[in-house]
Image (spheres, helix red, strand yellow):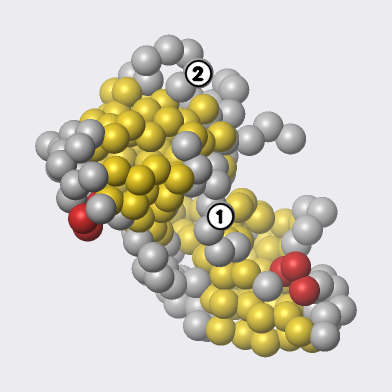
């Protein structure tokens, strides 16, 4: 069964450093998402991406965040200058088309020191 | 986005059927009902999605009454490995965004 894959599984970074989280969505999916989950809290929406542009973003997704689909297979989330409060699990998701469910990867655990 | 209410936790013995009910009184016409399962340190895993009546797949059934103000996820003969958090989400999945808004979910504990 096709799945969303995310790398790395765990990223440890010094505060203030840039970090790029990578995702390979399911092939032929058209809609892409990033969510995050701080330890012990709810899964929170960050951004949705369709047709090579952001379709919606949350208040969390400020100027420090950016997303890119550099080629036909990868979808990345960049945090320019990480803060301690960025420590969380980051989940990528994709869906094939409207009315289809989103499928999630197993996340990248980001630890900011 | 329709707000959902589901029990915080449930306990079950292995082999029993588990029914988790979710209420969504202000569900909109375009809204679908979707259930996810999440294990610790893993991403939410899609279980089932429906719009009305009954939907069944290889792992669960979803019952939606005619007024669509609630839904029930039914897990037949649960095992220890079904111990997880289960999320009921309601939203319009027809748009280009269609973000998912997660609540705190129902923590299901299955024991022998």
Q: Is any part of residue B105 visible from this angle? A: yes
Question: Circle 2 — which element?
Answer: loop
Q: Quadrant of the N terminus of chain A?
A: top right
Residue for point 76% across, 84% down: B111
Using the image as rendered, state which of residue B67 and residue B88 is in the foreground. B88
Decide: is B24 above or below B55.
Answer: below
What's the distance in space between the residues labelled 2 and 1, CA to CA? 22 Å
Seen from this angle, which residue lies furthest top? A71
Q: Is residue B81 left or right of residue A85?
A: right
Relative image position of residue A53 (x, y in whole percent): 29, 23
Using the image as rendered, state which of residue B68 and residue B80 is in the foreground. B80
Residue for point 63% across, 78% down: B108
Residue picked out by circle 1: B42
Relative image position of residue A103 (x, y in whole percent): 56, 42
Relative image position of residue B87 (x, y in whole percent): 53, 65
**How busy is the neighbourhood of tag 2: few (under 14 within 10 Å), some, or many (20 plus)?**
few
Which of the 4 image quadrants contains residue A81?
A: top left
Tell me which chain the residue with mark 1 is part of.
B
Q: Which is in the foreground here, disc 2 or disc 1?
A: 1
Residue for point 56% across, 55% down: B42
**How busy is the neighbourhood of tag 1: few (under 14 within 10 Å), some, or many (20 plus)?**
some
Decide: is A10 above or below A54.
Answer: below
Asked if the residue under mark 1 is in contact with the one under mark 2, i.e. CB atoms within 8 Å, the reply is no
Decide: is A62 above or below A89.
Answer: above
Q: Is any part of residue B66 visible from this angle? A: no
Relative image position of residue A96 (x, y in whole percent): 55, 30
Tell me which chain the residue with mark 2 is part of.
A
Residue picked out by circle 2: A73
Question: Circle 1 — which element?
Answer: loop
């Amino acid at each position: 069964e096709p799945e969303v894959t995310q790398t790395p599984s765990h990223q440890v970074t010094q505060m203030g450093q840039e970090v790029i989280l990578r995702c390979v969505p399911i092939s032929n999916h058209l809609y892409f998402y990033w969510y995050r989950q701080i330890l012990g809290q709810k899964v929170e929406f960050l951004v949705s991406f369709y047709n090579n542009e952001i379709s919606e973003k949350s208040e969390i997704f400020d100027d420090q965040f950016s997303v890119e689909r550099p080629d036909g297979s990868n979808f990345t989330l960049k945090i320019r200058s990480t803060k301690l409060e960025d420590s969380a699990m980051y989940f990528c998701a994709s869906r094939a088309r409207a009315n289809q469910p989103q499928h999630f990867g197993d996340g990248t655990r980001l630890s900011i020191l | 986005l329709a707000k959902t209410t589901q029990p915080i936790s449930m306990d079950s013995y292995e082999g029993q059927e588990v029914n988790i009910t979710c209420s969504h009184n202000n569900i909109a016409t375009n809204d679908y009902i979707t259930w996810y399962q999440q294990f610790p340190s893993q991403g939410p895993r899609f279980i089932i999605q429906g719009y009305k009546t009954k939907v069944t797949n290889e792992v669960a059934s979803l019952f939606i009454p005619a007024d669509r103000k609630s839904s029930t996820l039914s897990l037949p003969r649960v095992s220890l490995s079904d111990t997880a958090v289960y999320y009921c989400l309601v939203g319009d999945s027809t748009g280009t965004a269609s973000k998912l808004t997660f609540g705190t979910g129902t923590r299901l504990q299955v024991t022998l």
